[in-house]
Image (spheres, helix red, strand yellow):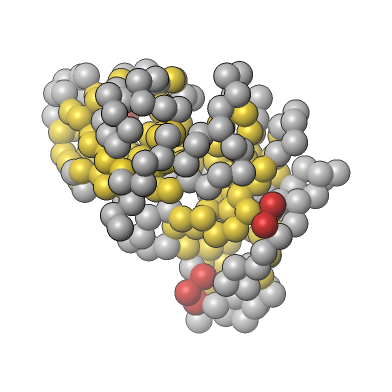
């Protein structure tokens, strides 16, 4: 059972370039999330999707976009990368996205460096 | 608004010493609290949640609504406990969906 798969594992990107971080889950979870992890700031929600076809903005959505064409995939796109987007990005999912006692399942993360 | 505060960025303890990782929260409704752990080179994973009232790897956490706290405790630290620990609060957003807010994390370092 793979759970959540993220790709790439790491990436160095020139500022101004476009980049898509991929996230795929095989658990048929309704809800998916993108977080960024920064030292001293913890995990901050970028975007989320409660079900296929719907997305929403989290705490720090500027400069990022997402799509949810189907249940399994939830790509995160940086249209024009800036150095402040250097971070570790985690994709996560939860079964229904409605019950507040559900745990989150996480991917292994993507280390992104924007130069 | 929901908020989680972890006041310590780093906590260093000796092996065998007691551990307490602090977590305070702010939430207007009835919160669901969690502790997640990230071991070196591993993905973030659930350690325990208050609703289960369980002890995982010797860790426990009690929800204190009066003090709005959910501190993580272990009586005797082990070297394998060294990791990054995140406290998280799960509530509902305006649309009725789950919204999870994480604290800034505490790195636990257990000294042999």
Q: Which corner quadrant of the image does residue A7 belong to?
A: top left
Q: Position of residue A111 (x, y in %)?
A: 26, 44
Q: Position of residue A11 (x, y in %)?
A: 17, 41
The quadrant the N terminus of chain B occupies is: top right
Relative horizontal placement of residue B70, taking residue A31 as reference (left or right) = right
A20 in relation to A25, above or below: above
Q: Which corner quadrant of the image does residue B42 belong to?
A: bottom left
The residue positioned 58% from the left and 61% from the top of the image is: B11
Mark yes or no: residue B13 visible: no
B19 in relation to B85, above or below: below
Mark yes or no: residue A22 visible: yes
Number of marks in the rendered image = 0
Residue at the outermost front position: A28
The residue positioned 47% from the left and 41% from the top of the image is: A95
Nearer to the camera, A108 or B103:
A108
B73 in relation to B88, above or below: below
The residue positioned 65% from the left and 78% from the top of the image is: B76
B43 in relation to B97, above or below: below
Q: Position of residue B41 (x, y in %)?
A: 33, 61
Relative horizontal placement of residue B73, taking residue A30 as reference (left or right) = right
Q: Position of residue B14 (x, y in %)?
A: 58, 77
Nearer to the camera, A4 or A60:
A4
The residue positioned 41% from the left and 40% from the top of the image is: A29
Relative horizontal placement of residue B10, taking residue A49 as reference (left or right) = right
């Amino acid at each position: 059972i793979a759970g959540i798969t993220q790709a790439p594992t790491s990436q160095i990107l020139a500022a101004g370039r476009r980049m898509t971080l991929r996230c795929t889950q095989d658990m048929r979870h309704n809800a998916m999330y993108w977080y960024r992890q920064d030292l001293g700031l913890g995990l901050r929600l970028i975007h989320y999707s409660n079900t296929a076809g719907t997305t929403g903005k989290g705490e720090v959505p500027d400069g990022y976009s997402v799509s949810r064409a189907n249940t399994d995939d939830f790509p995160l796109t940086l249209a024009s990368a800036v150095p402040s987007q250097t971070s570790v990005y985690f994709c996560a999912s939860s079964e229904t996205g409605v019950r507040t006692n559900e745990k989150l399942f996480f991917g292994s993360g993507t280390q992104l460096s924007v130069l | 608004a929901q908020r989680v505060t972890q006041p310590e960025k780093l906590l260093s303890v000796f092996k065998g010493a007691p551990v307490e990782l602090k977590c305070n929260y702010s939430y207007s409704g009835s919160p669901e609290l969690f502790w997640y752990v990230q071991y070196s080179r591993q993905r973030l994973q659930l350690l325990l949640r208050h609703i289960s009232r369980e002890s995982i790897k010797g860790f426990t956490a009690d929800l204190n609504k009066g003090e709005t706290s959910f501190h993580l405790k272990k009586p005797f630290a082990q070297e394998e406990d060294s990791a990054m620990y995140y406290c998280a609060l799960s509530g509902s957003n305006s649309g009725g969906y789950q919204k999870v807010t994480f604290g800034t994390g505490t790195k636990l370092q257990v000294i042999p």
